[in-house]
Image: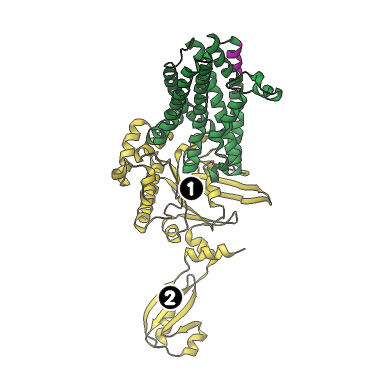
Chain colours: A green, B yellow
């Protein structure tokens, strides 16, 4: 890894974040509206089920965070495709990992800032019983989302730019399969098995438990870290080989 | 050590119809300090070759060395290479200064050098008035100036220019050609692709012609033209034509008061001027038309 190249890419990404108006909508507006809607619902829901609204609010907060951390990395890649600028960067000798790693840094910083703001905003509607456990769940969410961005990036490279929609749609399926608002036992058996290997299942389970009991079982924390890091380790060779295959097939030079 | 050594490079792509060979056994040595042009019809393999040189495309066979190193094993060597294409783009939202800062950092230019170099290029390429504007609002000429400036920011040893004057007005195209001569004079090896044959003839030390993925010719402009054109036409404008039968026997083609004679390359014009003088034919004007690079291009491109 050459840090001057990563530094350059991070510089560029932050210039894009400040120059492109809709980025502030993506980063702040949608997550904030989500927290406001479900925050107010959580106050209303206290009348009939005290924890219901709090669970929905916290899960939506994690959902927004995961979505931002994954989709923005891939959207930045797609913007390079649409603008035809990726080749200009690659001819400088920028490697596939430098290209991805810089994006993970840029988006990681933004995601953490946004999530911190969401936690502060959410605390106007709910009382978080335990901030330490909350932060412990934030980390595997970030790692899992970044791993997914590498896998989605690999898919787009292999399949072509027509599959760019995966950048902002793929995470919704994984979130659904991670049993966000209910225990995974509510799923049919096959989906239960699938849910056990999804990156966010134990994060959501931990978040629900945090809001109902005040703490998170160690097993949920351990499993969420384990699965997130397994996804991360698997995503790296998938991304690398897809990138090199795209270089071999001519997709990198012609379509990107 | 040559600036660029291309050894036995072949590239095929798999398609539904089977394998398509975009390049076959291409070998070239480009000397340091040369302006080397790669010509060929559309689809000949020029861009494929440039993409392999810049490592954005992997060769199926063979290797490419830039300043003695293979880019796929030593990507750092690409920091000594500049690239500019008529299709070059940057993110639409970036301002002119952002672009230069970014690429300066990307190519490892030290901060103190970058600031000085950036401002020098902004001035040299008339980018002062647009330095705060976004890329998407720039005109074609402004974009070309920015992309060229960006390609020179890190003072590359080798620069690849893929149709650099395509789409530019004549004034802008001339400025680009002047800049190419200037950077070459300063020691940068230039590899150029262009469909403008006048430009290639004016600039190139050597050319290579690619057709259907293979190198057909390589050498100086005059050498490759001579290989395919051994004759040229001389046109004599005369006041009056006499002895038409005799002139036709000597190989003159008569059209009104214009005589056309096909001569061998190296054959003396004065010999025929003396002959016409002997025939008491008054020659008012003489013009020679030697085959240009465009004639060569059309001849080779039409060969199967």
Secondary structure of residue under mark 2: helix
Secondary structure of residue under mark 1: loop
In the rendered image, is residue B73 in sight? no
A195 relative to A23 in the view: left or right: right
Mark 1 vs 2, N-terminal side: 1
Q: With respect to residue A222, does B147 lie above or below?
A: below
User: Could you tell me which chain the residue with mark 1 belongs to?
Assistant: B
Q: Main secondary structure of the magenta part?
A: helix
For marks 1 and 2, give the CA distance: 36 Å
Discs 1 and 2 carry the same chain letter: yes
- Residue furthest to the front in view is A47
Residue at the spot 46% in from the left edge and 25% down from the top edge:
A37
User: Could you tell me which chain the residue with mark 2 belongs to?
Assistant: B
Question: Residue B269 has which mark?
Answer: 2
Cβ–Cβ under 8 Å for marks 1 and 2: no
Crowding at label 2, few (<14), some or many (≥20) Cα neighbours within 10 Å?
few
Along the line of sight, the residue nearer the viewer: B183 or A12: A12
B13 relative to A88 in the view: left or right: right
Along the line of sight, the residue nearer the viewer: B161 or B184: B161
Where's residue A203, x and y in %? 57, 18
Question: Residue B31 has which mark?
Answer: 1
The magenta segment:
A219-226
Where's residue B222, x and y in %? 48, 62
Where's residue B253, x and y in %? 48, 82
Magenta stretch: residue B74 in it? no
**Comparing marks 1 and 2, which lies closer to the viewer?**
1
């Amino acid at each position: 890894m050459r840090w001057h190249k990563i530094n350059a890419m991070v510089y560029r990404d932050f210039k894009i974040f400040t120059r492109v108006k809709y980025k502030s909508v993506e980063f702040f507006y949608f997550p904030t509206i989500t927290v406001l809607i479900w925050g107010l619902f959580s106050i209303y829901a206290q009348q009939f089920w005290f924890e219901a609204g709090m669970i929905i609010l916290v899960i939506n907060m994690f959902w927004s965070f995961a979505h931002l951390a994954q989709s923005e990395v891939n959207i930045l890649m797609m913007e390079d495709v649409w603008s035809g600028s990726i080749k200009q960067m690659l001819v400088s000798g920028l490697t596939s990992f430098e290209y991805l790693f810089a994006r993970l840094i840029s988006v990681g910083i933004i995601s953490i800032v946004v999530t911190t703001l969401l936690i502060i905003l959410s605390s106007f509607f709910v009382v978080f019983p335990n901030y330490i456990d909350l932060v412990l769940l934030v980390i595997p969410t970030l790692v899992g989302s970044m791993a997914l961005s590498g896998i989605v990036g690999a898919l787009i490279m292999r399949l072509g730019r027509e599959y760019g929609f995966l950048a902002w749609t793929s995470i919704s399926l994984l979130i659904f399969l991670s049993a966000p608002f209910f225990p995974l036992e509510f799923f049919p058996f096959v989906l239960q098995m699938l849910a056990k290997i999804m990156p966010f299942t134990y994060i959501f389970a931990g978040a629900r438990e945090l809001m109902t009991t005040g703490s998170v079982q160690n097993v949920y924390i351990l499993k969420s870290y384990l699965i997130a890091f397994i996804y991360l380790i698997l995503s790296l060779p998938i991304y690398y080989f897809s990138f090199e295959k795209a270089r071999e097939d001519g997709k990198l030079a012609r379509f990107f | 050590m040559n600036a660029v050594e291309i050894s036995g490079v072949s590239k095929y792509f798999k398609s539904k119809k089977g394998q398509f060979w975009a390049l076959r056994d291409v070998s070239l040595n480009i000397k340091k300090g040369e302006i080397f042009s790669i010509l060929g019809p559309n689809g000949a393999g020029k861009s494929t070759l440039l993409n392999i040189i810049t490592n954005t495309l992997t060769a199926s066979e063979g290797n490419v060395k830039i300043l003695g190193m293979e880019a796929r094993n030593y990507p750092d060597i690409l920091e000594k290479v500049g690239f500019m294409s008529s299709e070059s783009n940057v993110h639409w939202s970036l301002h002119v200064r952002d672009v230069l800062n970014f690429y300066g950092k990307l190519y490892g230019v030290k901060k103190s050098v970058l600031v000085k170099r950036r401002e020098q290029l902004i001035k040299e390429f008339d980018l002062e008035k647009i330095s705060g504007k976004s890329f998407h609002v720039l005109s074609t000429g402004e974009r070309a100036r920015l992309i060229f400036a960006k390609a020179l920011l890190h003072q590359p040893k080798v620069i690849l220019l893929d149709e650099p004057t395509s789409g530019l007005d004549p004034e802008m195209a001339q400025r680009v050609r002047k800049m190419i001569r200037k950077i070459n004079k300063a020691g940068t090896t230039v590899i150029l692709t262009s469909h403008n044959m006048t430009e290639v003839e004016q600039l190139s030390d050597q050319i290579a012609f690619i057709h259907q993925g293979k190198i057909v010719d390589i050498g100086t402009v005059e050498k490759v033209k001579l290989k395919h054109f051994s004759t040229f036409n001389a046109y004599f404008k005369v006041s009056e034509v006499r002895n038409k039968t005799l002139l036709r026997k000597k190989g003159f083609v008569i059209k009104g008061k214009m005589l056309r004679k096909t001569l061998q390359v190296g054959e003396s014009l004065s010999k025929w001027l003396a002959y016409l003088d002997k025939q008491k034919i008054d020659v008012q004007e003489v013009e020679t038309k030697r085959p240009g690079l465009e004639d060569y291009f059309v001849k080779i491109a039409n060969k199967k």
